[in-house]
Amino acid sequence: MPLLPTTMASPFSTFSPTSAARALLPASTSRPLALAAAASSGRIPPSRKGLGFRRGRFTICNVAAPTAAEQEAKASGAKESQRPVYPFAAIVGQDEMKLCLLLNVIDPKIGGVMIMGDRGTGKSTTVRSLVDLLPDIRVVIGDPFNSDPDDPEVMGPEVRERVLQGDTSLPVTTAKITMVDLPLGATEDRVCGTIDIEKALTEGVKAFEPGLLAKANRGILYVDEVNLLDDHLVDVLLDSAASGWNTVEREGISISHPARFILIGSGNPEEGELRPQLLDRFGMHAQVGTVRDAELRVKIVEERARFDKDPKAFRDSYKEEQEKLQDQISSARSNLGAVQIDHDLRVKISKVCSELNVDGLRGDIVTNRAAKALASLKGRDKVTVEDIATVIPNCLRHRLRKDPLESIDSGLLVIEKFYEVFS
C-alpha cells in the first residue's frame, strides 16, 4: 500500500476563516476580502488608507445604483423578454374594478384599491393589464428611487442633496410608471432594502441596496392574495403607506427614501379578511363577482382562447381601443386640477361619512378625490351628484367594519345613506 506524501497538510492543522473564504472566492475578490478582514480587526495597512476604510469599520458610500447605460439596457432587455399582457380594453365586464383602477391612475393620491372577489374572476389579469395604459413620468437617469427632478418630496437622498447644492445638470428622461409585484414569500430585507454584500466584499464599503419599496416609488405596488401576506410585511406596508417614506436601520446603515406608491391588492374573501388598519390604507374597495350571463361567459372563454393561440395578433386587434383609452387617461390627468366640486356637495359627502360613523377623515378625502377624477375622466370640469353616487360605495364600504370578525358591507348601507342625505 503506497504511503501518503509527507508534504500533505494534516487534517488537524490550524483553520483560518479568511483563508477558507479566499479559497472559495475568485482571485479578483480575495484581495478585497483580506482588506475587509483587516478593517474589521482594526489592522489597516497604511498603504490602504485611500480605499474608504475607517478604524475598525467600513465607511458608507453612495446608494448602489445602476448607471444610465445599464438602466437602459436592462429596461430594453426586460421589454423584449416579458410575456405578453392581456389588453385592458379586452376585459369583459367587471366595470366596478376597472373604474377603480382607472381613477387611481388618473389621481394616484386616491390611495390605491383593494379588489376582493371569487377565484378565477380575472382580478390579477385586470391589474396586470393596466401596465399598457400607464402614462410616462419624468425621472432622473440612474436613480433607483425614480426621483422626480422637480418635486423634492419624491426625490431620493442623493438627488435631493445635489439639488440643495445648486446642481442644475441632472440627467432627466421619461419612463413609464412602474408596476412592482410583491410576492407573498418576499423577505423584509428585499422589501425595505439592505446592505449590498457584493460591494462590501469587492470594494470594502457599505452601500445600500434599494428594495421593492424604492422601486415602487411614484409607481404601483401590487400584492396578489394580500390577505395571506405575513403580518411583519403588512406592518412595513402600513408604515410606508402612512408616511410615504421608508426608513432603513440595519448593519450600520441609516437611510430614508420616498416610498409613495399606489397600493393595489387582490384576494379571495374565503381565504381570510384583512386587518381593518390595512383596509383603511386602501383608498377604494372593489368587489368582483362571477359573471352569471351565459353569453358573456362564452365571450370571455372565446377571447381568452384567441389570446392564448396568438397573443400578438390578439393585442393588435385591440391596439386602437388601447390607444384611445391611453389618450383619455392622459387628458384626464392633465385636466384634473381644473375640476371643481361645489361646497354644498362637499358638506353632504362629509355628512354621509359622519352619519355612517366612519373613523377619521380618509373617507371624506378619498370620496372628493375620486369624484373629481371621474368627472375629469368624463371630460367635465365640475363634479355632479351622479359622479359622487358612482364612487362613494367604493370609497366607504370597507371603512364601516369595526370588528375584524365582521364582513365588509356590500355597499347597500352606503347607498341608502347617500340617497337619504342627497335627497
Image (cartoon, rainbow, N blue to C red):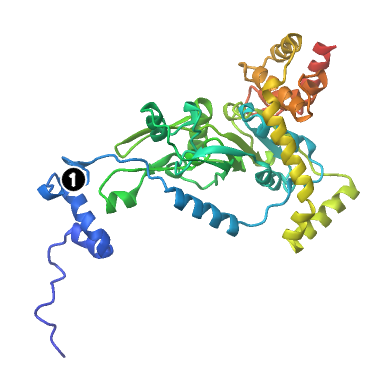
Check the image and report above or below for 365 versus 62: above
Q: Residue at x 72, y 20 (%)?
A: 339
Q: Which residue is mark 1?
A: 50
Q: To which quarter of the image does residue 118 belong?
A: top right
Q: Nearer the viewer, residue 176 or 27?
A: 176
How many marks the image carries: the answer is: 1
Please tell me in which quadrant of the rendered image residue 194 appears: top left
Q: Secondary structure at mark 1?
A: helix
Extreme residue in the bottom direction: 1
Q: Which residue is outermost to the right?
A: 295
Name the residue rendered at 54%, 57% in the picture: 77
- In the rendered structure, the answer to whether residue 343 lies left or right of residue 180 reads right
* x and y, in percent, of residue 88 in the image: 74, 45
Residue at 58% x, 59% y is 81
Residue at the (48%, 50%) spot, across then down: 71
**Could you tell whether 277 is left or right of 69 in the image?**
right
**Quadrant of the rendering where the N terminus is positioned:** bottom left
Left or right of 52, for residue 139: right
Work out whether residue 400 can be spotted: no
In this rendering, does residue 237 appear at all? yes
**In which quadrant will I find the C terminus?**
top right
Picture coordinates of residue 332, whole percent (x, y): 72, 30
